[in-house]
Amino acid sequence: MADDEFTLVVSSAIRDAFTSGKVSTPVTCMDLLLSLIASKAMACSSLRLTDLHRLEIALQSLCSRWEHGNLTLSRENGVLTITDVHLGNARVDMVNSRKRKRPPVDEEADSAAGDDADERSSRSITHSPPPSVTPFANLGKDLREVYAILQRATAKGRLLAERFCAPHGTFDPVCSYITKEDCVKARRESSGSLNPSESTSNICDRVHFKPLIRPHTDPSLGHCSYLNTCYSEPTYAQSPSIPPFPSGSATRVSLPSGLGAGGRGKEKAPCRYLHFEVDWDEKDSQAMDASDTGRKEIQRTHNPFKLEIGMGPDGKDMQTLPPQWINCDLRRFDYSVLGKFHVIMADPPWDIHMSLPYGTMTDDEMRAMPIPALQDEGLLFLWVTGRAMEVGRECLRVWGYTRVDEVVWVKTNQLQRVIRTGRTGHWLNHTKEHMLIGVKTHVDEAGNLKFPSWANRGLDTDVIVSEVRETSRKPDEVYGLIERMCPGGRKVEIFGRKHNTRPGWLTLGNQLGPDQIFEEDLAVRIKARYPERLASTLG
């Protein structure tokens, strides 16, 4: 589609969107694009997420000359936002788009007055005051400054973030333009430069992607819904969640096929939609090193104020042991040899009545799990999805826990967009999962639930937004959340895999390989109970 034709399509689409009240100001360019695509209007059928850069250019051109009214744009931190809209000679009321009721009319007086009344009525309608402006546009300079102050982090929030700052930053923001070429074009447009020969040295310092064009790829189809988790992608077959090939065997790993399995299924045909990989080169590495150097210098000179919070069950900083794990059949293992834990996290293989690439456990087997033997006092974090949300709550009661909260994991894809085509769900595509939080049930004399005195409360939110990886792999952010609630103490993860192992945790699962145990007393108990086990004890 040519640029002029694209601009006409955008002009008509945003007019209809604002007139119908489906979109209100202020709205970012990305949110507007998502709304136009979701509207499924005929004019928007050709729009794709990759058109973000073209949409920004079209809006900037319409800002100076729009036949349907006027647009007011602003750009902050590289994000283009429509702050206000006028349609024709009247401003669009984005807050209350309901039609105003017409004043009552005396029909007899109106008919007696004849044409004069009609004329006066017409004049009154023509010159009626325009609807009220949007709240954002009504704000004066002082109120806008107050609004900006309210959006800033509080001192307590900054101190908490500093208290729990990871020693090595792991978050790399993704450029909203996805590719380096689109990023350069956008920065050139925002700076007013008209030199098309500018190099990629002008790109932002965020992560970019490049499309993978293979012989079977049809770029006109747009992005694959599953991107790097598509069953047709070689990167998926290399996932640590899939068992490796047996030695000396050329047998392929059996993966799901058919609807929702990457195009028409791995076994039938490769996926023809667009896939991406990180676009990284030496120049990016040099820029990142320079950025890290500046950040480390800032950290060294920063005043190290600390917010006093609970130090966990031990009441002091304890030495963190290296990752430990025990490879076992969780349905038959003797949990009594493990001792007691302050924190339990479990991601059970629930039977959610769907075809899954791993074995599941029945509801009765889950209820019979000896979870109560692992805790006298503490917290239980239980992952659930689908019908397991109800079964999980029932298991908490059976095991002797009271549900006190839950965390929602909102899933994003490789390009950091919200997933719209999850692989689970009978009625709706699931784009989220839940983690129930339970407390071992102990009540006081008045019947009130007693919380562990060492648990830190009110530090985190109940929403995690994180990228989907291999099947059943959960976000790493949840470990930080748990460790902030319970610094120190013994922690165990049940139904874990090798990628779940981490310092300070004991992981139980049946895909972990030879045991690794650093707690000497735990190694002695396991050796006494299971003499045949060959554990690596590094006490």
Image (spheres, helix red, strand yellow):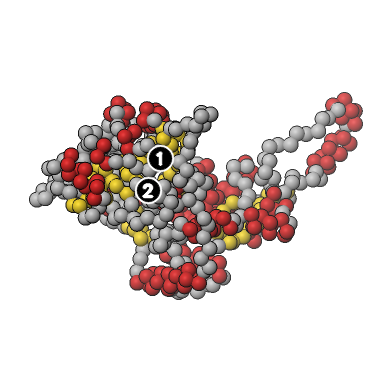
Q: Toward the viewer: 331 or 31? A: 331
Callout 1 crowding tier (Cα within 10 Å): few <14, some 14–19, many ≥20: many
Q: Amino acid at mark 2?
A: Gly
Q: Which residue is mark 2?
A: 489
Q: Earlier in the sequence, mark 1 or mark 2?
A: 1
Q: Toward the viewer: 489 or 166? A: 489
Image point (29%, 50%), residue name: 501
Image point (27%, 33%), residue name: 360
The percent position of residue 232, horizontal first and vertical second, equals 27, 48
Marks 1/2: CA–CA distance: 10 Å
Q: Quadrant of the C terminus?
A: bottom left
- Asked if one can make out residue 279 in the rendered structure from this viewpoint, the answer is yes
Image point (64%, 58%), residue name: 149
Q: Toward the viewer: 377 or 477? A: 377
Q: Which residue is mark 1?
A: 378
Q: Amino acid at mark 1?
A: Gly
The percent position of residue 85, horizontal first and vertical second, equals 66, 52
